[in-house]
Amino acid sequence: MPAPQAVPIPTLRRLPRYYQFLSRLQGAGHDQVSAAHMAEVLGVHHTQVRKDLAMTGCQGRPKTGHRVADLMRAIEGFLHWDNQSEAFLVGVGSLGTALLNYRGFERAGARIVAAFDADPRKAGTSVGDVPILPIEKLRDLGRRMHISIGILTVPPESAQATADLMVAAGIRAIWNLAPVTLEVPPDVIVENLEIFASFALLLRRLADSPVEAEAEVHPGL
Amino acid sequence: MPAPQAVPIPTLRRLPRYYQFLSRLQGAGHDQVSAAHMAEVLGVHHTQVRKDLAMTGCQGRPKTGHRVADLMRAIEGFLHWDNQSEAFLVGVGSLGTALLNYRGFERAGARIVAAFDADPRKAGTSVGDVPILPIEKLRDLGRRMHISIGILTVPPESAQATADLMVAAGIRAIWNLAPVTLEVPPDVIVENLEIFASFALLLRRLADSPVEAEAEVHPGL
DNA sequence: TAGATTGTTAATCGATTAACAATC
DNA sequence: TAGATTGTTAATCGATTAACAATC
C-alpha cells in the first residue's frame, strides 16, 4: 500500500474553485491553460496552483500548459467526483429544496436518491426527480440501500435528533448545514458547512477596509 | 492608532462555533465555562481556544473560568455582530428564501432590510417582514440608504450581472453564495461561501476512512 | 536554439501545540 | 495553602512562497 499521501486541507478547499474556473474556460472554448493564468484570475500564488494540481496527479507540458479537459478529469478523480456516491437529504425546507433543485450538485460527486421530511404533507411529492418520503422510512431504506452520505438541512432544533436517525440508518458521513455542533459516534464523519464563519469573515474584512476604518476613527463625521 | 493587530483567519472561522456553543450552554442555564471544556466538546486544542478567546479581549478568572455571557458579548463585539449593518439580498429563490427565513441571522451581525428579484411576480410580496422589490430599484435604493453589504443568492448564470449591479448600487462587500468567481473593482470585497469545498472535504474524509479504504483495496468483496 | 512553462527542492512564514509562570 | 485554571512565551509543525532545474 502506498503511503497515504497527506492532502493539505487548504488544497482540498481550492480544488473545487479551480474546477469551477476550468469548466467556465471550457464553456468559452479554451482547451489549454497555464498555472500562471489560473493563479492570476483566482488570486492564488502560481506555485500554489502548481502544487495543488500536482496532487491530483495531472501532468502539464512545458510551453503549452495543461489541457483543460485533462485537468478537470484529474480533479474529478482526486475528489472522488467520478464514482457518484448516493446520498439522502433530510429536511425539505427552503434550504433542502435549494439543494435538491441545484443541478450542478451531481457534478460534485453525489447523487441525492431520496429526500425525507417530517411533514406528512410533503411525503409522496417530489422535487425535481427526487422523491420525498416520510422520515419514518429513513432508517430502513438507509440500511437497505447502503447509503453512506446524509445531507442534513433541518432546523437547528431537530438537527441532533436527525443526526441520530441518520446514524441508525447506517449513514457514515453527515454533511451538516445546520448551525449546530452534532454529537455522533467516533466512526461517523461530520462535515459542517460553516455559513456564519464565512459571513464573519465578510464583516471583519469590511470593518478592516480603509473606508470603514476611517468611519470608525471619526464616527459621525 | 494601534497597530492593526492581525487576526488569524482560522481564529475568525472558529469564533462563530464557540459562540454557537456558548449560546447553547446559556440556554441550558450554565453561566461559567472553562476553555478546557470548550476545547473538549468542539475538538479544538485547549491552548487554541485560549488564544482565540484572548483575541476578543475577554478575560477569564483562574479556577472559575469564563462567564458565558461575557464571552458571548466579547465575541459579538469582536466580530462586529453588535453594530448591525444593513444588507440587501438579491435573488429570492429557494436559497434566498432560506436565508430570509433564517431568524438566527440577525444575531450574526446583519439585518436584511430588503430583498430583490428579477421576477416581477415576486415584487410586492415579502418573506417574513422583508419586502421583495423589483431588481430595477436596487441601484437607487442602495445609494440612497448607503447599504454596504450585498447577499448574492441568484443562479450562477446571473451572478456576475448581479454583482455588477450591486457595485453600481454602492455596495462595498458582497457575500457570494453562487458557485462562481466574481470580478469586481479592487475596493469591493467578495467573500465566497465555498459550499463545494465543504462537500469535497466530506467526500475525501469518507474515502480516507478505514472502512471505505478497505472497500477500495478489495473492490467487489 | 531560445523562451515559456512545468515541477521540485529549499527558505520563509504563520498557525498550532507544548511548556510554564501567574493568579484566584 | 493547594489546586485548578488562565494567559503567555517558546518550540514545533505545516503551508506558502521563493529559487531553480527540467523540458517541450
Image (spheres, coloured by chain):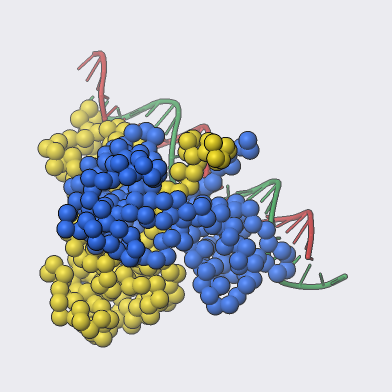
Chain colours: A blue, B yellow, C green, D red
Q: Residue C7, relative to residue B125: is it above or below? A: above
For the C terminus of chain B, give its image quadrant: top right
Looking at the rendering, in which quadrant would you find the N terminus of chain B?
Answer: bottom left
Work out whether B197 lies above or below A217: above
The structure residue drawn at horizontal position 20% and vertical position 78%, both measured from the top left corner, is B122
Residue ID at (16%, 58%): A121
Please give the count of numbered marks on the rendered protein: 0
Which percent across, then down, holds residue B37?
A: 27, 33
Q: Is residue B34 left or right of residue D19?
A: left
Q: In terms of depth relative to the viewer, which is nearer, B103 or A43?
A: B103
Which of B169/B96 is in front? B96
Task: Examine the rendering and report whether any part of residue A133 can be seen.
Answer: yes
In the image, taking residue B169 as reference, residue B190 lies left or right, namely right
User: Residue A14, position in %: x, y?
Assistant: 49, 57
Name the residue located 33 percent from the left edge and 33 percent from the top edge: A185
x and y percent of residue A195 in the render? 31, 56
Q: Is residue A7 above or below residue A44?
A: above
Q: Quadrant of residue B193?
A: bottom left
Instruction: Inspect this view and state whether residue A34 appears.
Output: no
Instruction: Please tell me which residue is depicted at 60% across the width and 75% down the height of the picture.
Output: A30
Q: Position of residue B181 (x, y in %)?
A: 45, 69
Q: Quadrant of residue A100?
A: bottom left
* Residue A37 figure quarter: bottom right
Along the line of sight, which residue is nearer the eye, A150 or B187? A150
